Image (cartoon, rainbow, N blue to C red):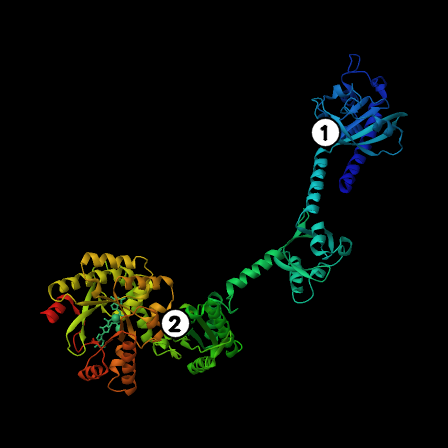
């Protein structure tokens, strides 16, 4: 196993032996008396100068050569007679053993052996023809031991049989070998697949992990080219790539597919590098590879989850925007247009709320597959979340291309959706933003397409709209409102105005609707239609609603005490306010504190409040009803105008939306609708208020229908409390 080392060892000892032979012939003659018996320790009659003295006694050229060789040798050299008595030791041997030369010359070869070492090796050497190296543990003067490799050789000088030993301390070497053995075992047992490849690319060694992971037995792989590990097909390139790089002297690291015996393949993370000798020449290559197939499959799963919507399988927001940025790059390079279509299903929330999420999900899946079926091959359909989808198109020549697609998408929704044996009609609103005109980045285009979509919704839905800079202004206005509305309460920027509600026949003011007003130094006066939805979304409507309630009740209580105990005050409650668990308590507290007559308080709610179907809304409405408060359905005619709501909830009043009232003059259909609504409300024992009455003509008609009350500019605009008091009671 020590091939190279022993070669070197023999070369050296051969040289030494020649030298010793020459030297011995000079000093041996006068030293017949030198021989001492093996059992004898150092004694007085033994000459103390020993061999060293002998060299000096005979000054000749050959002796110098001998001395030079033996004294310079790093090998320990000793010569003993057949009984084992040392007759010569060189300085290296003395150093090795830790004894002075004189002492050693009084000792035997057996004295320097560590205990438990038998004497057979010396006896064997003595009788053998050729010297053979053996290992023996020697003990130094200080008691420490070391492993020595001894080459014993019989020599005959002037007819005398002597045994020469060349001694080398191989403790380090043995330790190194042990290390190598341990290392080898570690490599063998390592869970990492290890492979040694020669400079021709042939596999020279694989460990058992290799066998286990690939299923290829060692005997089938040794001597085979590295490239055969690549699986059939395209990933063949990886192993070729590795080999090409190694040949260039560069290490390779990365993921690669490896063939298994059964033809399958699996993912590994591999590290390939050259092993070089001390001159820097590559002697072979080593490959360490780890089976990462499990991690890889988990990664793929996570990647899929991170990039695709689980419900519809469409690219999600993240992947969609990533694709968009690629489309924009291409469009930029090719000087083409790209379009982003932002598609939102109309009234999808109602589907979810009324038919349940399961049906809603089925509808989304069906909508997604319809969308996917319509777009061109290279286009992307993605789902941003909820009922929002986007369609990405590159390589357009004119904005018209996008419009055509938008039209065909809207057309696509014409056909009814069949879900659970139920036919449903679903429309969509689409906003379009074009690159480069409407934005340079994915997020800018997305934002603008979103604004355009909202515009399409405001145009009556089921349509599409291109982005315009006007929308941009709307968006920045919206952002400004959002920013300013925070803290508006503490800055005292809100106030409440009161609009008279009159008896249709007598025109007497019977009460007022409280309407919130906001004056902000930066934005000026902002319409409730603009800030109420934002207050709803941010939740700020809750403290704002409290403010209105306290203000309105305090004023109304005073007016009741001073002028009219039956004066009615009507307050708007929006959906978000019902989510406040403290709503009913707050109302109760405020009634007590303001000392208002509870029977004169009215709350206006829209159908939107009821549509969410949450039980806490029903509970709150019931509680208000039990407190003897009037409940009015606001904006009747704009939503579903569902009779079932009117029947199932304790409404007392129906407020006909001003859009019907304003249409009285021009449309007979609207006139009939109002008449029908009034008749129906009366049938359900509800009183009716017509909103937005601006002209005598409108009033005339409303009087003819039997409508109970009216509200509108004809009788008075919403006014601050002082002005209201002066105008109405003044
Ligand atoms: P709404 O409840 O339908 O309120 C009536 C709206 O019609 C008011 O608009 C009023 O100024 C307007 N109006 C009254 N008479 C006429 C008329 O003759 N012609 C026309 N064209 N309009 C008339 P305003 O004050 O801008 O309020 C808009 C909406 O904001 C309200 O609609 C209501 O839904 C909401 N809102 C206002 N104040 C509050 C509030 O304190 N709390 C809540 N939750 N919502 C409020
Ligand atoms: Ca109202
Ligand atoms: Ca209204």
Q: Does residue 301 lie above or below 193 as drawn?
A: below
State whether label 2 is within 8 Å of ligand 1: no
Badge 2 vs badge 1, beta-carbon distance below 8 Å: no
Residue 692 placement, left or right of 427: left
Helix, strand or loop at disc 1?
strand
The residue where tag 2 is placed is: 450
The answer to which image quadrant residue 650 occupies is bottom left
Which residue is rendered at x = 72% and y = 39% of the image?
177
Q: Is residue 207 visible?
A: no
State whether label 1 is within 8 Å of ligand 1: no
Helix, strand or loop at disc 2?
helix
The answer to which image quadrant residue 45 occupies is top right
* Residue 13 placement (x, y as % from top left): 79, 34
Name the residue nearer the viewer: 364 or 622.
Answer: 622
Crowding at mark 1 (Cα within 10 Å: few <14, some 14-19, many 20+) = some
Name the residue nearer the viewer: 269 or 292.
Answer: 292
Which image quarter is the N terminus in?
top right
Q: Does residue 462 lie above or below 544 as drawn?
A: below
Residue 606 placement, left or right of 463: left
Name the residue nearer the viewer: 477 or 283.
Answer: 477
The answer to which image quadrant residue 698 occupies is bottom left
- Furthest residue to the right? 159
* Residue 533 placement (x, y as % from top left): 31, 68
Marks 2 and 1 sit apart, C-alpha to C-alpha, by: 85 Å
The residue where tag 1 is placed is: 146
Residue 668 placement, left or right of 560: right
Q: Does residue 217 lie above or below 497 as drawn?
A: above
Answer with mark 2 or mark 1, whichever residue precedes in sequence. Answer: 1
């Amino acid at each position: 196993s020590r091939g190279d080392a022993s070669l070197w060892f023999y070369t050296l000892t051969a040289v030494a032996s020649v030298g010793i032979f020459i030297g011995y012939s000079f000093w041996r003659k006068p030293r017949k008396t030198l021989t001492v018996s093996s059992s004898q320790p150092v004694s007085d009659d033994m000459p103390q100068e020993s061999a060293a003295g002998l060299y000096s006694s005979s000054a000749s050229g050959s002796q110098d050569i001998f001395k030079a060789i033996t004294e310079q040798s790093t090998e320990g050299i000793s010569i003993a007679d057949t009984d084992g008595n040392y007759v010569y030791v060189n300085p290296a041997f003395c150093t090795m053993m830790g004894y002075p030369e004189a002492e050693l010359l009084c000792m035997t070869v057996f004295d320097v052996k560590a205990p438990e070492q038998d004497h057979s090796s010396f006896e064997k050497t003595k009788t053998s023809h050729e010297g053979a190296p053996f290992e023996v543990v020697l003990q130094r003067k200080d008691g420490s031991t070391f492993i020595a490799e001894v080459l014993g050789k019989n020599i005959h000088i002037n007819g005398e049989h002597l045994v020469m030993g060349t001694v080398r301390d191989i403790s380090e070497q043995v330790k190194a070998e042990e290390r190598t053995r341990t290392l080898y075992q570690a490599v063998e047992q390592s869970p990492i697949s290890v492979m040694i490849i020669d400079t021709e690319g042939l596999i020279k060694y694989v460990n058992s992990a290799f066998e286990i992971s690939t299923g290829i037995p060692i005997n089938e792989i040794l001597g085979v080219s590295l490239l055969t590990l690549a699986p059939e097909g395209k990933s063949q390139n990886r192993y070729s790539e590795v080999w090409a790089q190694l040949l260039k002297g560069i290490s390779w690291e990365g993921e690669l597919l490896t063939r298994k015996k059964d033809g399958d393949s699996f993912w590994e993370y591999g590290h390939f590098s050259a092993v070089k000798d001390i001159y820097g020449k590559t002697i072979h290559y080593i490959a360490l590879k780890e089976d990462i197939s499990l991690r890889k499959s988990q990664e793929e799963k996570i990647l899929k989850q991170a990039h695709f919507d689980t419900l519809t399988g469409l690219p999600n927001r993240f992947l969609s925007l990533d694709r968009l940025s690629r489309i924009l790059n291409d469009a930029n390079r090719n000087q083409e247009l790209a379009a982003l279509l932002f598609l939102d299903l109309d009234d999808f929330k109602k589907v979810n709320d009324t038919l349940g999420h399961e049906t809603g999900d089925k509808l989304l899946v069906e909508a997604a597959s319809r969308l996917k079926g319509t777009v061109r091959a290279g286009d992307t359909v993605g789902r941003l979340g909820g009922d929002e989808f986007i369609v990405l198109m590159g390589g357009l020549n004119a904005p018209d291309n996008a419009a055509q697609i938008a039209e065909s998408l809207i057309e696509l929704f014409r056909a009814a959706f069949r879900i659970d044996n139920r036919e449903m009609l679903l429309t969509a609103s689409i906003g379009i933003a074009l690159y480069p005109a409407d934005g340079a980045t994915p997020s800018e285009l997305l934002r603008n397409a979103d604004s355009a979509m909202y515009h399409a919704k405001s145009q009556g839905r089921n349509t599409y709209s291109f982005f315009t800079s006007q929308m941009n202004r709307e968006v920045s206005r919206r952002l400004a409102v959002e920013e300013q509305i925070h803290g508006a309460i503490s800055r005292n920027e809100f106030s409440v105005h009161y609009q008279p509600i009159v008896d249709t026949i007598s025109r007497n003011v019977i009460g007022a609707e409280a309407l919130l007003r906001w004056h902000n130094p930066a934005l000026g006066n902002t319409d409730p239609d603009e800030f109420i939805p934002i207050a709803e979304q941010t939740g700020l409507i809750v403290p704002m609603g409290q403010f209105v309630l306290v203000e309105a009740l305090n004023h109304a209580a005073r007016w009741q005490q001073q002028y009219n105990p039956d004066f009615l005050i009507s307050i708007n409650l929006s959906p978000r306010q019902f989510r406040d668990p403290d709503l009913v308590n707050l109302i109760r507290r405020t009634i007590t504190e303001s000392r208002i007559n509870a029977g004169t308080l009215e709350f206006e709610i829209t159908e939107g409040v009821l549509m969410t179907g949450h039980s806490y809304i029903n509970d709150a409405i019931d509680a208000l009803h039990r407190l003897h408060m009037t409940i009015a359905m606001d904006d009747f005619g704009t939503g579903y105008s569902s009779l079932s709501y009117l029947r199932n909830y304790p409404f007392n009043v129906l407020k006909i939306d001003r859009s019907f009232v304003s249409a009285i003059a021009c449309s007979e259909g609207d006139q009939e609708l109002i008449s029908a609504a009034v008749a129906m409300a009366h049938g359900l024992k509800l009183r009716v208020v017509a909103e937005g009455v601006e002209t005598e003509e409108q009033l005339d008609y409303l009087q003819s229908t039997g409508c109970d009350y009216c509200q509108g500019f004809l009788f008075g605009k919403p006014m601050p409390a002082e002005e209201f008091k002066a105008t109405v009671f003044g």
